[in-house]
Amino acid sequence: MTFSIIPVFTIVLLVGLCVYTWITRDKDDNAGDYNNMDRSATWLYLAGTYTATLVSAVGMVGLPGQSYTTGYMYGLANWGSTIGLMLSALFFGPQIRKFGKTTVAEFFQFRFDSKAFRLIVAIITVLGTGAYFVSQTIGAAVILETIVGIPFNTTVIIVVVIVAYLALVGGAKTVTVTDTILFCVIAVALGVVFAPTVIGVAGGLPAMKILAGTTPEFLKLGGLANAPFGTMVGFIMLWALGIGAAPVNLSRAFLAKSNREWLKGMMVAFCVTVFMIWSVHSAAAYGRLINPDLTSGSQVMPWLALNAVPKAIGLAGVLGLVAACVSTADTQLLVIAQSSALDIWGHIKPDLDAKVAQKRTRIMVAIFAVVGAILSLGNSTFVVAFGNFGSSVFAAAFFPILTTALFNKRVTKAAAMVSMIVGIACDFVLHVIPMTMGMAWGTVSYLPYGIHPVIWSTAAAYIALFVVTALTKPTKQEIAAFDHAMAVQEPIDPNLSDSHMIKIAVGLLVFGAIFFAFVLYLSTCCVA
């Protein structure tokens, strides 16, 4: 049997990660560290955990697969999540920190003085984040199946066991630290080493220019699917709104030592994320020039690592892909467990001390690890489908409320509740209707101009929110909760005006474009 360095080092990375987690665990098992890192995370940890969570199996396996199968721009257009990142960085994160809570559902309870509201939000959080978690499990299992040669269902179990171990042993503090380590692996291994090499092996820009001449649709926004413009705008909005309002991302703000540390971390996360998106999607699209015959787009990145580049470069790519999947899944599993233990279970038996809550969270980690494994088995092609579902849930349910309730005391509990119900119901119905017409779940072609259901659902949720807000008045408790939070003075940076913030955001976009140009330059250097 021929020795292969890639499977061996992949196993070494996973085992090493588990050993490191055990060695660096909190020996005192502090509940504050386990739940929210005692709100002590600096910019590096925030950048690490946010980026490592964002560039996930969907981002590094599923969506690049669409760049391979459907079109270069088609895959990239799904990355409205960078818009969501900026919303979290500049608006939602600093504002929600003022409420000083541990979970997003806990914030909703405090803001609207309603335990029932907290319970409903927690259930939605578990469902939406659960869909995300399953997509990560599937993505990581597909990679391990391709690399190690173990059957998919077996790799599902392996992935779930590792991810559950990380969440059980370390909690928020250890998960954040390991995410930061994996974030460095992802950025260097995938973005700087692997992606430019793949582009170079494929022939660089001249080769892509030839493909553009023979198959121009591959480089058009709608791709080979000829997706309508409305559909593509819908995908962008799906990820922008979904990522911006996703509890797994918003909860990172609760870890921050200060708003200044949060902002600095998000700026770094933005730069690295933009760079990673362009790099990995470029590699996947150029992979079509190397091998156009793969049956599934999700296979393209691991296949390129194993077959298209030198072994050392392939190893870097594989380690980056595995790191992307694991670093996202452990965070998502912990958020699901916290929402279940602190918000759902806590609704039944409230007012328990932190240690008991910590024990409950660990129990829920184990339970949802098993549930995630069961849902992942036999579903190796559903990476993007599960991710899209999770994002649409948060976009329709939470985004309208967050954009208003965080900044306006007039928003009432009744308005927020009706908005949430309308958004979810509309999104669900619009996803189901095509099944009654003999089409697949989530098909958008039947809608006017092919506009994605998330846009219709979010618009309906906003309308419901504004109408009910106009017809109702906030209670004294709701106003008091809002005023209490707004009295917390923790500016992002007193020396930064709004105009300076806009300049920073524009500068970051330019920075991302320069990184993309650098990747293309490296690709031309690699051409033999």
Image: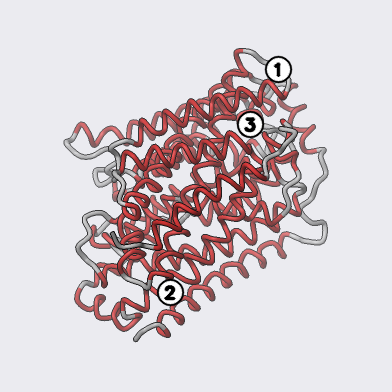
Single out the residue that lies furthest toward the top. Answer: 349
Residue tagged by mark 2?
196
- The disc labelled 2 sits on which kind of residue? Pro
Which residue occupies the foreground of this view, 262 or 454? 262
Residue at the location (30% across, 56% down)?
Answer: 299
Colour mapping: secondary structure
- The disc labelled 1 sits on which kind of residue? Leu
Can residue 381 be seen here? The reply is yes
Residue tagged by mark 1?
352
The answer to whether 14 is drawn above or below residue 495 in the figure is above
- Marks 3, 1: nearer the viewer: 1
Residue 181: % across, % down = 60, 55
Query: CA separation, marks 2 and 1?
Result: 52 Å
Residue at the location (72% across, 59% down)?
Answer: 498
Dot 3 or dot 2: first in sequence order is 2
Q: Dot 3: within a 10 Å radius of its alpha carbon, few (fewer than 14), some, or many (20 or more) residues?
A: many
Dot 3 or dot 1: first in sequence order is 1
**Labelled disc at residue 411:** 3
Q: On the picture, is 354 further left or further right than 212? A: right
Query: CA separation, marks 3 and 2?
Result: 49 Å
